[in-house]
Image (cartoon, rainbow, N blue to C red):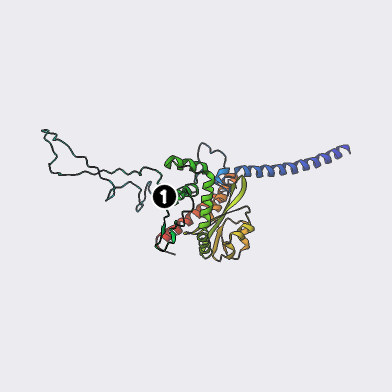
Amino acid sequence: MILEEQNAQLRAENGLLKAQIAELRARVTTLEAQLALDSQNSSKSPSSDPPPPQTPPGSQRSARGKKRGGQIGHRGTSLRQVATPDNIVVHAPEGCGGCGAPLADAPVVTTLRRQVCDVPEARLLVTEHQVETKVCTCGHATPGAFPPEVRSLTQYGTRLRATALYLVTAQFVPYARTAALVHALYGVDISPATLCSIVAASATTLAPVTEIIKTGLTAAPCVHFDETGISVGGTGQWVHSASSPTLTDYAVDPKRGTAATEAIGILPGFGGVAVHDGWASYRHYACTHALCNAHHLRELTFVTETTRQGWAGRLIGLLGATYREVDAAKAAGRT
């Protein structure tokens, strides 16, 4: 009787251990899957990737039968001579290399041309505006008027402001480094706070353009929507993008979901095909939805790397082959 009780107890403990082992295996699988996530096989940003291994991860691009280097029809960027240079410097021989006779009046039989392309000397150009007051014969004094853009005793000009704005917003040069670069090039001091004011003023000026872009995207037949995390002043926020082949809108919002989408105002009135990653908040809108194949490829790569299931690799090949077929059809002028 005692042996039967011990056996029953061992069987119960064995069943409990098996259940715990199964639970731990599931947790290990989940944790390993989380560790395996990176920008190559998920929607995580590249900045969150661990240090790269000695060999880079395999590319999802496949061979397309093209030779290395520039393709036929590709417009190169080689430096070329211009027909009308700004300056011409003539280097004429002073004396004959044979007998030593002077060649000042000798005829020129050939001329070889070489051109040096350089930027002009960078210096600050200061324009002073003076308003005169004149007195009429009737005795009335009438002053002139400054141009509307000249508002201060001393101010930065439009070209300098545009240069600084381009460095900050198009080339993503930090504010302090932009200020240092402007000083190094032009010898003028400009503070990061002033750069912030220039960016803010330009954003206000471009607000009507932003609305035109949003209107164009809302009416477009197909638009890709996406969102990615960003740090704004040390606070996590989201960059929302909406893009067509000709238009792109970026918007930063503390929220990722529907509240941000409503505030941005493109997707709520959109009636075309919305291409996205399947994020749930997109599904609320009554347009046609299409899932992004770039996200599919990353997720299939994750399945391939973590589970070694062959179907995922075959599906990657199918999607790539489908893309190449569509690409070739477009190149041939087919719909």
Percent position (x, y) of residue 75? 35, 52
Residue 19, percent from left and from top: 75, 44
The residue to which callout 1 is attached is 128
Horizontal and vertical percent position of residue 145? 44, 58
Count of numbered tags: 1
Asked if residue 288 is positioned above or below residue 51 in the image, the reply reads below
Q: Can I make out residue 282 in this image?
A: no
Inspect this view and state whether residue 265 appears: yes
Left or right position of 317 against 116: right
Circle 1 packing at 10 Å, graded few (<14), some (14-19), many (20+), is few
Amino acid marked by disc 1:
Glu
* Disc 1, SS: loop
Q: Nearer the viewer, residue 154 or 330?
A: 154
Q: Quadrant of the C terminus?
A: bottom left
Q: Work out whether residue 191 or residue 37 is closer to the camera in this orientation and state it.
A: 191
> Looking at the picture, does residue 16 appear above or below residue 240?
above
Report whether 266 appears left or right of 64: right
Quadrant for the N terminus, please. top right
Residue 67: x and y in percent read 37, 48
Out of 142 and 37, give the one closest to the viewer.
Answer: 142
**Furthest residue toward top:** 99
Residue at coordinates 44% horizontally, 48% vertically from top-left? 160
> Seen in the image, is 283 located left or right of residue 317?
right
